[in-house]
Amino acid sequence: MKKVKFLSVAAFGILALSVTSCKKCHECHYDKAGAEVELGEYCDDDLEELEANGYTDTSGTYEVHCHEH
Amino acid sequence: MLQKYIKIIRLTIVVFLGFGTSLGFAQTFSGTVLNKETNKPLPFASVYLVELSTGTLTDSTGHFSISNFPTSPTAIKISAIGFGTVTAVITYNPNEVYTFYLESKHVHLDEVIVSTPFGKLQGENVTNVTSIRLNELNRIPTISLSEAIANIPGVYQSSLGNGIGRPVIRGLSGTRVVTYLNGLRIENQQWGDDHGMGVTDVGMGSLEVIKGPASLLYGADALGGVLYFVNQPYAKLNRFEGYYQTKIESNTLGSNNELGLKWNTNGLKVNVFLGHTFHGDYMLANGSRVKDSRFSSSTGKIALGYNKKNWVGNLNYAFLNSFIGIPGHSHDDSLYAELFYSSKPAWIKTLPYQFITNHYLSIENKFYFDKSQLELVFGNTNNRLREFEEKVTIPGMDLALNNSIYNFKWKRELGKKFQMILGSQGMYQTNSNNPKAEEVLIPDSYSADAGAYALIEFEQKLFTFQAGARYDMRKIQTENAFNGFDVFDKLYQSYNYSAGFAYQADSLTFRVNVSSGFRAPHTSELLANGVHHGTFRYTIGDPNLKTENAVQVDFSMGAHYDHLEIIFNPFFNQIQNYIYLQPSDTVIDSYQVYKYSQSSKAQLFGGDFSVHLHPHFAHWLHFQSSFSYIYAQDENENALPLIPQNRINTQVKIEFESERKWRITDLVIQHSFYFDQNRVTSFETTTGFYNLIHAGINLEIDTKNNPVFLNLGVKNLLNENYMDHLSRLKQIGLTMPGINFYFGLKYNFENHLKSKFK
């Protein structure tokens, strides 16, 4: 019976872990004059805003590309 | 403590299913199973209650005992390794002595079919159904469920890397194939070529495949066939059972892991399954890897079952979360295989990819009366499909599909030889776009289905006759005008039928069946107007498309002997108003434009020929081979697109008998030969033939009462560099996976549980 209890707890533990969310961060960059300009790591709302609005510097606004690291 | 939990769960399920809390139990059914030739008891024979999805084993004296046996007529199935299956409908009588005799058989095991309404044995069924246990299909394990079922004669897989695979039945796929899971119709945007099956093998027990139209039983869209998946049965009475299994593959440096736990005590049955799969980019025969062919998925399943007197209730819930890379995707004008090569293995998410979440819930109630049976199923499926192409937080496409279904069926005996079924099915579906998504390919829409049918069956000696008719309607509606299309509101109607007979003698079976099917055009075919990144196309629909209607004649002849089984199964399927995707010369936003068109007629014909030899002089040897042939043409006798290559599949299995603690159970060699596909449309290329050889060895280790099963082997042993005609990566020259070593382990455990029943 101990084994049954252990396995039951283990199963529900794995299930709980599998549905737990975590912070989503990505490395981002934009392309300028044929070169990649690294912007560093962005997470959650900052990441979403950066992707939606692009990155603006003195020369204009650029589309940003992000990827997991 | 466990008993307390079980009481709480039992109360929950009774409340859920809408019944009272008075938990009455019926009588104990006991009997003996004997070897027909020797009259000796058969230990460890399985006595399985079909409607309850549970059963027990005989003890060392061949005796079994099942408490809480229903008071109404109940179908049981008795089987043992090396013996034929006996099925019977038992109306319990306390004065009767129940003895069952099993006859030794070597090649043919008949299964009780659950996907057709009369619950017949495979051989007695008028509808042609192929029933397969998943563990038999997986003697050499596959990376996915869709790859596993592509070993069934007449069934293929259309793939986009390893992560996306969908079934092709006799040349038809997508919205022409209906998938069921435990009586629940699965809806998951099947219209997209890059949208997979939405079902994994975690907790799966068996599969039934209906090849060809089956709208009489399954309504709209069952034009090409039906896949009916059934979860693993519940634990045997008063037992706790479980298993853990893992499998690793060298080609993708990936793994499939699964935990199954089952309880069955005091009338309550609980199954819990958890699974996690991850695979990296697959390796080609030349050693390079295909970028973004990685994928991972997590699955959770729970099933609760309870029965009381003449009522059986089941509640099933499944959750599936998948990340799937989309390989072969680029905006470059010139696409070639090397563009997608990678030298290092990778598992992390990189754009583009799909993120898919599925929830499946069904509640099933069956009531058994003296001469009739009532079945009610209610269910809901919820699918969210997000395709990320350029940005990780803003999806390229984001669709939420919600589908609610009901299924009502009343079966009634009309005398000794006649049975009748009246039924009705319906569903209500909403499909909506996330406004934040970059693209909207198809409009927000809803559809409502309703259908009613009647079916009658007549038995005369060795013949079974069956005929039925059905009426269906589907309403499709949009709320707003969409990308140049007006508000859409149309009703599609169809009448369908099926008629046929089956003849089953000791060693000979015949079956002839004529069945029709229909498929109303899908919203994507009617109203699409936009970029579909997953398929790299700009797609335009046609709101004037008509309903597809199909009629199939299916003939099956089988010879079943103790050591030889031969099955010949030709078919002819004619589809009116066949819908297909036609590429045009137009390019929008650098995507080639594809338009939906309709051909007045399409014909698909061919068949399967299978042989299973188990020679008497070499009882350790099983030789199985099948040949699948499909020919397809439109009204002008031109080829139809994406018709699979003809194929010969052969398997040789050598079984070993040993009493050692470590023992080899069997050695399996599989060979597949795919013929050239030279009949192609003007926008396809031909595909050359290829050979595939897989080899595996299965071992068993005795550890007290809990054996450990090991399997190891190699797939694509010759490291063949091959192209499959149904691979979507073929158009850019990316071939299929190269050599792949695998290792698998399965550990079973079980325990007796205390019960108030002796």
Image (cartoon, grey):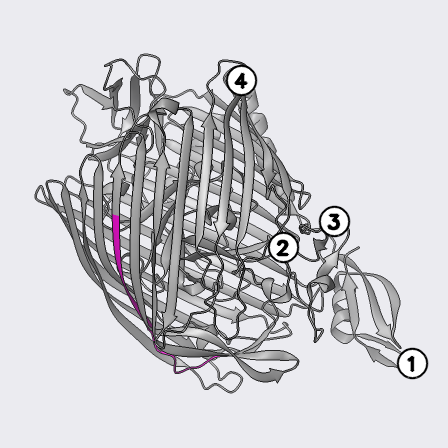
Residues marked 2 and 1 touching at CB (< 8 Å): no
Q: Secondary structure at mark 4?
A: loop
Residues marked 4 and 2 touching at CB (< 8 Å): no
**Tag 2 residue:** B323
Q: Few, some or many C-alpha atoms within 10 Å of disc 3 (few <14, some 14-19, many ≥20)?
A: some
Name the one closer to the observer, B626 or A34: B626
**Residue located 64% across and 44% down the image:** B739
From the top left corner, tell me how far across and down residue A20 is, in percent. Answer: 66, 47
**Residue located 77% across and 53% down the image:** B343
Q: Tell me whether marks 1 and 4 sit on the same chain.
A: no
**Residue located 40% across and 74% down the image:** B638
Q: Nearer the viewer, mark 2 or mark 3?
A: 3
From the top left corner, tell me how far across and down residue B390 is, in percent. Answer: 71, 69
Question: Which mark is on residue B345?
Answer: 3
Q: Is residue B74 left or right of residue A64?
A: left
Q: Is residue B349 above or below residue B525?
A: above
**Tag 4 residue:** B702
| Lower position in the chain sequence, tag 2 or tag 3 | 2
Q: Nearer the viewer, mark 3 or mark 4?
A: 3
